[in-house]
Image (cartoon, grey):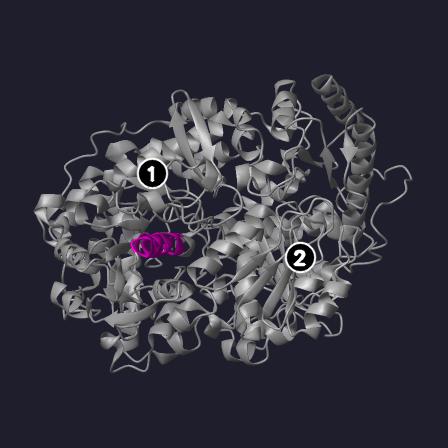
Amino acid sequence: MRYLPLTDADRQSMLASIGVQNIDELFADIPAEVRLKELANLPRHAGEMEVERQLGAMAARNMAASTVPFFVGCGAYKHHVPASVDHLIQRSEFLTSYTPYQPEISQGTLQYLFEFQTQVAMLTGMEVANASMYDGSTACGEAVLMARRLTRRSNALLSGGLHPHYRDVAETLSKLSNSPVNALPGDPLGSEDIIAAIDEETACVVVQSPDVFGRIRDLSEIAAAAHDKGALLIAVVTEIVSLGALKPPGEMGADIVVAEGQSIGVSLNFGGPYVGLLATRQKYIRQMPGRVCGETVDANSRRGYVLTLSTREQHIRREKATSNICTNSGLCVLAFTIHLSLLGEAGLMRLARINHANAIALADGLSAIDGVELLTGNFFNEFTIRVPGKGADVVEALAEKGVLGGVPAARLAPDHAGLDDLIIVAATEVNSPDDRAAYVKALREVLS
Amino acid sequence: MSGAHPTFTGNKALQIEEPLLFEIGEVSKTGVDLIEPDAHDKRLGGLERKKIGLPGLSEPEAMRHYVRLSQKNFAIDAGIYPLGSCTMKHNPRLNEKMARLPGFGDVHPLQPQSSVQGALELIDTLAAWLLELTGMAGVAMSPKAGAHGEFCGMAAIKSAQLEKGDARALVLVPESAHGTNPATAALLGYKVRDIPARDDGTVSPDAVKAALGPDVAGIMLTNPNTCGLFERDIVAIADAVHAAGAYFYCDGANFNAIVGKTRPGDLGIDCMHINLHKTFSTPHGGGGPGSGPVVFSPALAPYAPLPYVVRQGDEFVLVETAGAASDANKPFGRLTAFHGQMGMFVRALSYMMSHGADGLRQASEDAVLSANYVRAGLRDVMTQPFGDQICMHEVLFDDAFLKETSVSTLDFAKAMIDEGFHPMTIYFPLVVHGAMLVEPTESESKASLDQFIATLRDLVRAAKAGDVERFGGAPYHAPRARLDETRAARYPVLRWSPETPAQAAE
């Protein structure tokens, strides 16, 4: 077996050094009646070629985003990632290292975490950020718990524009810890009055912008209203590239910003791994969940970095910790940081302009089709259209024509009324004018 | 020592000092060529952003910056990384290649299901392997990491009991457990009751029975445990737990010791998370991403969260909503957006298929053999808290052998760095004084283990000979000397900011 360095001669010699006759003696503590002789129902070992053949066959049964006109978003976006990013994250020193528990030989990881935290703080317009969460949805759930600790209130108010998976995660966490949630119904038209729902019991108001339907929301008034009642505003961003074009939540009064960072540096991966961002105000750092990297000096007074504020964390505080999380999304953080270093402000803002321009062109093209209505007035790179018939059927028919045309809104939130005929459509820099033309043509055919 | 022959730059040959991105990049510079779109009217609702402050780098500068940073990291590919409880085994590169196939890496989680049948098949196939290896009835694939899996398992327990109208308030956790166990229990609103260990480092059924009662929801037990020992009375413990109407959560962090040797399902376990990044070789990546699928007994399987994959004839169906679940299933909710760590699933399956039934079992045997070989090589000079007994895939030492010296466990670990090793896990488990937990894994050659043992023997000799300098100031040869963690926590600086004048690197 190619991954096992010990030879049979090594094994015999090692058993002799230990002072046992055979390997079974080392497993003597496993009760005899539950000891396994072999794994009868699984195949034996396989060479690289065989594994490649089998997994390659499975991979070939999927329609890869880069092979078709592709317009699917809703919390995960197809963007172009520079070749150097994937090369760098596969360096052994990054790929095969662990959590930087020994900072003297982990400064590489620690420094990029510090750079990442700074980039996230700048992007979101916040003071500080942690070293990442699993993904945007779990970051959102943790932010709700954090707001409950900070306000000592339990009620979470969720906007109807929040991604339904994010809502479900927050509701699941809350239900299991017996904390109330007030989730407003799905709001494709932007008609909800969330300010009216804030009261003295509200711990936090959770608002996504651009929201799951693509609509851009000004958070300033909601922040002011929340603060008036002693509640916190949690802003959610599922398309981080939007912050290259839009005023950041930190400038609109958000107390905690959570985001999905996948768009920068990370492939679609059928949903994971991704990278959750969590940023907040300096005064709240001791209630922040997750790992944090901080600057310090070494014994020779040279600048260096360490994991810090660990008195919040489970390995020290156990049942009194701020979260049970004991990992971050390390390699995805690195990909994010490298990609964003390559983009810089100039590149990110241009990338955002291209996304916005492509989305406008697509929205105009689609809404010119008879029977198709554009529901989203202000949007970044994603918008919602109403089609005659069921959105799910239309998306399926488009796929048969080789166009992945978006997400049927009802797939995400089947329990919300009025979403059946809606499709959420995303456009990014990867879409060419030909892709857009192919979508318009296919949709026209499907609807005719 | 470190001051010998100072250089103008502060660099030491291959060790090159590297400033922060923010000190070398420029806001106007970019390493990505994009074509400016034609002028158009914006639809941003008057919320347009004017500036960000983010610096950019050209591609050569970015390469150099991150390559230099990488050279400040220790890695498995560079040497033995014997972090107990972390299973730092070799990460096969075939796994990386497979995860990057466009059919896996470049598919969107919300594409029509008809366009991702191969991806759903992969999830279903990995699930089948996990069920076969564990002898369990059901599996939740979506948890993003071990601790997320713990939450998933305990949530299923809570949901099962609530459905029976049997709300319970307590969870039993041995003192030697990972901190995530009590933190998870607390997250679900449980109070935690400690279970003491016996003198031999294992949990006794009597101690569990004494703590059980109608208010106990379950026990969270790690097996093999964090002292590197198999809980030999685990079946009796499971029986006692079930007799009290409680459930048995097993922390599967140490599954690497027993794959193919015994099955959690046969031990009476109700749910267990599996760290794909430990046992099944997905890369640790500097601290993540992980992946923590949870396997369930028949009693808990119906409560597994959304989404999940079912096979209907030749077709794979992704069940994403409670409404779409079959009548037999009562999913407790959703733990994350989308379907879990697909990139890690591909890697783990690639590893399993490569090893096969025979190789997986051999890997566990080699992991246990290597840990015992380290134990045998050090037992006459280092001390073990529970006496010299056979261990599983990791061997635990305490600091009793350092008693007459002025060397601490931390000093000892830092001196290992100078010798070119990553230290073992230290000060965990908390119940052992000055703990040193060594997990060599199956990936080390005998020559590598021999060198490790010889080095530790020399360090013990030096400590006992009073060579204080070798330890107190260590590490001398790392990119940084010992870092001031107290200062970092007391005066937290969590980001670069333009107000803070940049310090010289040296």
Q: Which residue is mark 1?
A: B328
Observer-nearest residue: B444 or B132?
B132
Q: How many marks?
A: 2
Percent across and percent down for residue A130 are 58, 63
User: Where the C terminus of chain B falls, by quadrant?
Assistant: bottom right
Q: Secondary structure at mark 1?
A: loop
Left or right, residue A347 beside residue B490: right
Q: Is residue B162 magenta?
A: yes
Left or right, residue B37 beside residue B243: right
**Chain under disc 2:** A
Q: Main secondary structure of the magenta part?
A: helix
Observer-nearest residue: A380 or A186?
A186
Give the residues in magenta. B149-164
Residue drawn at 35 percent across, 31 percent down: B353
Mark 2 burial class by Cα count in 10 Å: few <14, some 14-19, many 20+: many
What amino acid type should be assigned to the residue bearing mark 1? Ala
Mark 1 burial class by Cα count in 10 Å: few <14, some 14-19, many 20+: few
Q: Which residue is mark 2?
A: A207
Give residue A6's quadrant in the image: top left
Percent across and percent down for residue A27 are 14, 49
Q: Is residue A148 magenta?
A: no
Give residue B406's quadrant in the image: bottom left
